[in-house]
Image (cartoon, rainbow, N blue to C red):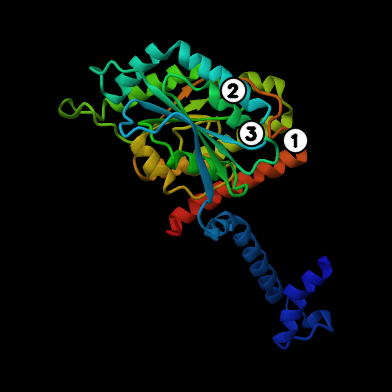
Amino acid sequence: MKYLFLYAVTIRPCKSLGFGVNHVSDFPYSICLLCLGTALSILLACYIFYPAYTNIEGGLGSTSTTLAGERKSDQDNTLSLVIPAYNEAERLPIMLDTTLGYLNTNRKDLSQLFRAVSGKKGDSSDIVCEFIVVNDGSTDNTDSVVKKYATNMKNGDTLKLVSMDKNCGKGGAVKTGMLQSSGQLCLMVDADGATDISDGLPKVLNDMKDLISESRSDKNSNYLPPAAVFGSRAYLEEDSCASRSKIRTLLMHSFHFFVKVLCSPRIKDTQCGFKLFTRPSVILLFTNLHLRRWAFDTEVVVIAEKLSISLSEVGVIWHEIDGSKLDVDKLTLALVSLGMLRDMVCVRACYLLGIW
């Protein structure tokens, strides 16, 4: 098959131009190499811009169902938690139990911190949590697990199940969930519960308070500017290098290098599934998000940089949980990493060329 391909892109074009190939001396190597280089360039361009092509497919179809609680008109005291889930019937209940238990036990303290971020220090009302589980075309009983969990919602909290019409990738699921959220602050959190909620939530709230304090004037203390805080595992790199294989360590450092070059030097760990956004940043970032697969976080950073949205990164306690979707063999991991690099190059190229 490879010989037919070489014939198609080299010998055949040369013949069509009137050059004979019966004698070595007559063979126009330069033209054939040009044809081969052109063909390879086209294939490379198709590979790089494939994520942009798949985005042309259209909107992200989904069905939304409120399982517990009622949506109120005043959402100033609401914290939305967007949880993308694909085949998470086993891990999701554990994560929800831990998260809801922490929120119920520490609601007073979290409400005070929430008010400090939102600028409503005189308000004494407790926060209301909006759980949005986005089922990204799961083939297990994730839907059923979420529906059964509705009876655990108390304190005015709401539980919404968003079912995607088909599997569209983590980026598509997060985008759909974020745009259906209603909170003034929105937290993206992975379904495996790898980030310790008792450590991560206070940290990102405190960091958000510091991040937006400079943008808020005394005359408009309730103004909530576009801002995002990324939970980070960058401080764990040294320990992880000691326990990971050489190939995983190499891929990790390579990915961080390309993130710094292609996205932003301000964020070291784009892939940690624990990020806090203000309502204005949700609208600006996720209405403009294109990538639908693993590397969508890198486009979020690029968009934030282009729109001058305030960014910050804070270290959070993170533990690896069994059942990871990336717990694969070395070859598959290398291919996934190559695909994420392709996505980053595609993002940078699309924004530079004005395609997006």
**Badge nearest the viewer, 2 or 3:** 3
Tell me where residue 203 appears, x and y as whole percent: 44, 18
Q: Earlier in the sequence, mark 1 or mark 3?
A: 3
Pointer 3: residues within 10 angstroms few (<14), some, or many (20+)?
few
Q: Earlier in the sequence, mark 2 or mark 3?
A: 2
Task: Name which residue type carries label 2.
Answer: Met
**Badge nearest the viewer, 1 or 3:** 3
Dot 2 falls on a residue whose secondary structure is helix
Pointer 1: residues within 10 angstroms few (<14), some, or many (20+)?
few
Of residues 77 and 191, the one drawn nearer to the viewer in this rendering: 77
Residue 340 falls left or right of residue 212: right
Residue 186 falls left or right of residue 232: left
Q: Is residue 305 above or below residue 97?
A: below
**Badge nearest the viewer, 2 or 1:** 2
Whole-number angstrom distance, CA of label 1 to CA of label 3: 27 Å
Query: On the image, which quarter does residue 277 sit in?
Result: top left
Instruction: Name the residue carrying label 3.
Output: 144
Residue 95: numbered disc: 2
Residue 125 falls left or right of residue 137: left
Instruction: Name the residue carrying label 1.
Output: 328
